[in-house]
Amino acid sequence: MKLLIKNMVCDRCRRVVREELEGLGLRVQDVALGEVEVEGEPSAEKLLEVEETLKKSGFELLNDRRLALVEYIKTLVIEEVQHLKGQKPDTMNFSDYLAEKTGYEYSYLSHLFSTETGTTIEQYLIAQRIEKVKEWLSYDELSVSEMAWRLGYSSSAHLANQFKKLTGQTPGQYKKGAVLARKTLDQV
């Protein structure tokens, strides 16, 4: 049985969820961001126990398919931006990529995402990119041009403009120490 889980955004989350579920006596077959495949069909009581245990660790068991689809969209964005998985071909725009991966038309995905989250997919994608830029700026290893290229921006100026629009600072100001608090990925 596949369990859909909200707020799984990194490999550490995958490990924690696996440990929690195995601690409850479930046989975990596979763990991916946002979903876990377990052996058999857990009872209603066991699912309640899973839900309570996951909640203590900051996760949420999803029973609503619409919410699960929203979480899947978030997972795809996070994998591409934060983990630089590179599954999206460079020549493909993000809307086509999401439509291909989910099997739904982008107009439906966009409407659903906006309705459920209060933000657009595009705004969410930009916010994830800006969080990645903040991370890279704090490490001081890449130029803004390199960051722009890695994140698929048309230019470093475009990246800098979006950064300033969202944070109120230029990347240079941020780098010089006027530090803005970074957000955890599930809060972006």
Image (spheres, grey):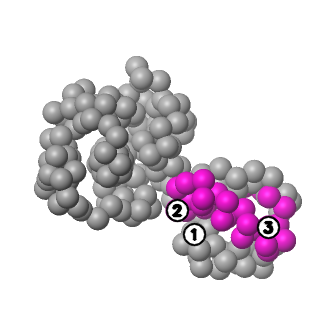
Between circles 1 and 3, the one closer to the viewer is 3
Horizontal and vertical percent for residue 27? 84, 61
Residue 3 visible in the snapshot:
no
Q: Report the residue that reaches farthest toward the top.
A: 91
Question: Which amino acid does the dot numbered 1 rest on?
Answer: Glu
Left/right placement of residue 9 relative to residue 109 reads right
Is 104 positioned to the left or the right of 138 in the image? right
Number of residue marks: 3
Q: Where's residue 109, x and y in %?
A: 43, 44
Q: What crowding class fits label 2: few (fewer than 14 Cα within 10 Å), some (14-19), or many (20 or more)?
A: some
Chain part drawn in magenta: 1-28
Determine which quarter of the picture holds residue 24.
bottom right
Instruction: Provide the residue designation for mark 1.
Output: 60
Q: Say which element carries label 3.
A: helix
Q: Which amino acid does label 2 sit on?
A: Asn
Image quarter of the N terminus: bottom right
Q: Is residue 47 above or below residue 105?
A: below
Left or right: 2 in relation to 126: right
Label 1 vs label 2: CA separation?
7 Å
Residue depicted at x 60% and y 53%: 11
Asked if disc 2 and disc 3 are in contact, CB closer than 8 Å, the reply is no
In this figure, which residue is indicated by the disc labeled 3? 22
Tell me which numbered mark, 2 or 3, is placed earlier along the sequence: 2
- In depth, the one of 90 and 178 nearer the eye is 178
Is 89 in front, or is 73?
89
Report the disc number at residue 7. Answer: 2
Disc 2 is placed on an element classified as loop
Residue nearer the viewer, 82 or 71: 82
Amino acid on which disc 3 is placed: Glu
**How far across and down, in percent of the image, does residue 14 sit?**
64, 57
Q: Are marks 1 and 2 in contact (CB under 8 Å)?
A: yes
